[in-house]
Image (cartoon, rainbow, N blue to C red):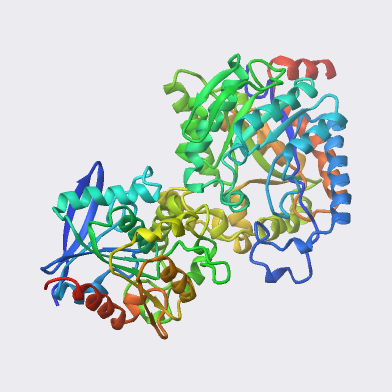
Amino acid sequence: MNVFDDIQFYLFNHHHYIDEPPDSDRYDSTWVSYPNGNFDAEVAHELYQRWTREMLLAEELGFDAIAINEHHQTIYSMQPATSVRAGYLAALTKRVKILVAGVPINLSWPSRVAEEYAMLDVMSGGRMEYGFPLGTGMEYWSNAGQINPTTARARFRENLGVILKTWTEDGPVRHDGEFYNYRYLNVWPRPLQKPYPKIYIVGSGSQETVDVATDFRAGYSIVFTPIEQQLKAMANFREAAEGKGWTVQPDDTIFTVICYVADTDDEAVREARPHIEKFFSWMHRVPNQFLSPPGYVSRSEFLRRAQSAALSDGTRATWDDMVSIGRIICGSPDTVADTLSHWAEEAQCSRMLMVLQHGDMPEWKAVKNMHMFAKEVIPRVRARATSGAAATALAGVK
Amino acid sequence: MAGYTEERFNLRGIETVVQIAGEGDPLVFFHGAGTVTGFDALLPLAERFRLIVPFHPGFGPSADDTTVDDIHDYRRHYLDLLDELGIEDFALTGHSMGGWLAANFAADHAERVRRLVLAAPWGMRVEEHPTVDFFAVPGEELPGYLTADMSIFGPHVPMPPTPEFLADRYRETTSAARLMWARPYDLKLHRWLHRLTMPTLIIWGEADTLIPAEQAPVWADLVPGAEVRTLPGVGHLMFDESREAVDAVGSFVGEGLTV
């Protein structure tokens, strides 16, 4: 059994709001404080239709899963209530798994999260997977001051504990916590998948998130961190899990990959680069103040971030900065398949979260990219399988 | 003018640094939500009093303690410090966030506070003249809210600010956020100010753009017999900006104390 025997491809879509005003330079943020007078519901309606088409195409093209997430008060994402979106997509799909990565559990009551996401699992026939992030710093500016960012990490741990407790222990049970007190913790419905759907902790490689993931025997998913730090974090995650008596499997980690496939490497970069740059410079335009609300990170993590241009200032990041913080791969099918295979092997990771629509990319490019990826890249990567379903399928083709 | 000597106390696990200068009756000073300009501007007070300036938990050289997240944790922390210092009654001055703390301390321990100075205190909810929510002010704009005289930052702020400097500010803002994140006022404050029965001076810079001086009369209405003094042209960091502010504290406190 090798890492390719059960390699799976998730199509992720940010659900951007794409409608950049002509005077966009005057805005220093497209999160939290970007004026919502710029929101046009007609434009958004068309975009929801488009993102639905792309998610459904993923099922048709043979992706293993579709993936969505939650953000607030931003053009970056039109999914402030991602469970609503997940319910809609679950009703329109039949086969694909649906990964909600993430569900910012700190922003709701943990019992409410446990109920909503159990409900989705039951309705979808057990097709759900969940990523739990701390929530970006920006989310903490969008919640009436009720969730103090200085408590984010402690609260995250307690919330996760409550969710898993109510999913696994028969209720009613009592919970006397630091943040929540339940006299009757007893959610209804409970998940269809037992003991509960696959979960991942979404982190940026900090020791705190690695500790949470290993303590709760959850998977681990890394976003927006320089590649060498991603590898270090993966190694750290593996080692910490061993120390706590369990072994990380290839499906316990997820890579997020920003990808574009075309006939040649040159064509891929030419077609994708302006849109990926737009993603960083416009969709991800966030001042430091919003990225790091007080206490959201430690003093030393604050220092580390202040020293990375791409992390602290998307607007001024260069193409090289972007490539260094993201797993960005634009190229021919061979280039992309080789790179993904290399990353999968290097990190012993069998779950690839593919971002194939970038910034203001027009629909035709995103759709072409999805077709190229499904028809040219997936088979090339799967060809490396030695056993299991992928190898059997391959042998059948041969 | 002599400088401070620094004393360290371990208060129930919190390493607490206290700057002390001068001889005489004790005058305790509670600082605000940042310590960037230091407290040398207060040293003239040490010519008449034993000036005691503790760094709050999570500020300057004092240690962090994430469980100190409530105004009464601060109040009790300072009861511990006063025990260590062997101080029974004293004069108290608090600036900004420290003014809020001083008001709370004095309301709960009126018998120990002989004279009280509230300098541009934080915490009053005044709808027509609201306190700026300083968490929402971008770092680069904050100095403009803190002072009417930018030169006060000269010796204290590297230009451009270094990542280390910014990380230190982030740490102190984090410590303040533990207490003050939920809202830029204390909903209960007005309810208990009648307990400030000691002679009280409310002092404010008229050019304060962070906590407007228009809040001073609201405090004065609630604190029995409070005296109000405003300083024309002076901003929020009044003691750095104005020797007159320092002297006003000295003469108000000195009136009631033997020197």
> Would residue A383 be seen by someone viewing this image from the given angle?
no
Q: For the N terminus of chain B, give its image quadrant.
A: bottom left
The residue nearer to you, when weighing B73 against A12, is B73
The residue nearer to you, when weighing A332 against A186, is A186
The residue nearer to you, when weighing A26 against A321, is A26
As displayed, is residue A79 above or below residue A316? above
Point out residue A12 in the picture as x, y percentages from the top left corner: 74, 39
Q: Is residue A382 toward the left or the right of residue A158 in the image?
A: right
Q: Is residue A63 toward the left or the right of residue A343 in the image?
A: right
> Would residue B93 be seen by someone viewing this image from the given angle?
yes
Point out residue A198 in the picture as x, y percentages from the top left corner: 65, 24
**Residue drawn at (23%, 78%), measured in percent from left and top?**
B251
**Residue drawn at (63%, 38%), measured in percent from left and top?**
A108
Point out residue A322 in the picture as x, y percentages from the top left corner: 62, 54
As displayed, is residue A120 above or below residue B210? above
Q: For the C terminus of chain B, give its image quadrant.
A: bottom left
**Residue drawn at (37%, 42%), measured in percent from left and top?**
B67
Point out residue B2 in the picture as x, y percentages from the top left corner: 13, 74
